């Protein structure tokens, strides 16, 4: 069974950069579309996480939320079973717990309720 682990979360100043990693174990990520989602700390548990970026199983198609377009880039390194989220020009409103999730055989839409596996999250805090 696939397990996902996020890393790279940190405290950074506004305008700074971070790179998050999502590393898979127990299975190869080659067969999965991977999405990044985020949830503000303290958000009600039942509220849907915000989709940030998604990359298709093949890696040739990506999608990102309008709020992060031009600032965040998703990429995959299948040799290392890892997907990255490069975050530049960070803003305080980007502060959240960032989760990666996998969708078996998926394309670059990464539907929230269609994701098969989730990581436990990485905290990103952007100070003003």
Image: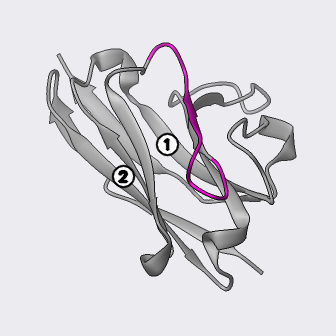
Return the disc, 1 or 2, that comes first in the chain's sequence. 2
Please tell me whether residue 36 is drawn above or below residue 118 in the rendered image: above
Residue 19, image x, y percentages: 29, 49
Residue 126, image x, y percentages: 25, 28
Residue toward you, 24 or 42: 24
Please tell me whether residue 56 is drawn above or below residue 26 in the rendered image: above
Question: Please, which colouring scheme is shown?
Answer: one colour
Badge 2 crowding class, 10 Å Cα cut-off, few under 14, some 14 to 19, many 20 or more, is many
Label 2 secondary element: strand
Label 1 secondary element: strand
Instruction: Compute the Cα span from label 1 to label 2.
Output: 9 Å
Position of the N terminus, as image quadrant, is bottom right
Residue 37 visible at all: no
The quarter of the picture where residue 70 lies is top left
Residue depicted at 63% across the width and 58% down the height: 58
Residue depicted at 64% across the width and 71% down the height: 30
Identify the magenta region: 56-67
Q: Is residue 110 left or right of residue 25?
A: right
- The residue furthest bottom is 26
Residue 95, image x, y percentages: 37, 28
On residue 98, the disc is 1
Identify the residue position indicated by label 2 in the image.
Answer: 20
Magenta stretch contains residue 43: no
């Amino acid at each position: 069974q696939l397990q996902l682990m996020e890393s790279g979360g940190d405290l950074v100043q506004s305008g700074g950069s971070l790179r998050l990693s999502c590393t898979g174990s127990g299975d190869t990520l080659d067969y999965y579309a991977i999405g990044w989602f985020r949830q503000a700390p303290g958000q009600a548990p039942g509220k849907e996480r915000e989709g940030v970026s998604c990359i298709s199983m093949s890696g040739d198609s990506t999608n990102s939320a309008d709020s992060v377009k031009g600032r965040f880039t998703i990429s995959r390194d299948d040799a290392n079973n890892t997907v990255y989220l490069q975050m530049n020009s960070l803003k305080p409103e980007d502060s959240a717990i960032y989760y990666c999730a996998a969708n078996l055989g998926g394309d670059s839409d990464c539907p929230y309720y269609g994701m098969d596996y989730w990581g436990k999250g990485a905290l990103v805090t952007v100070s003003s």
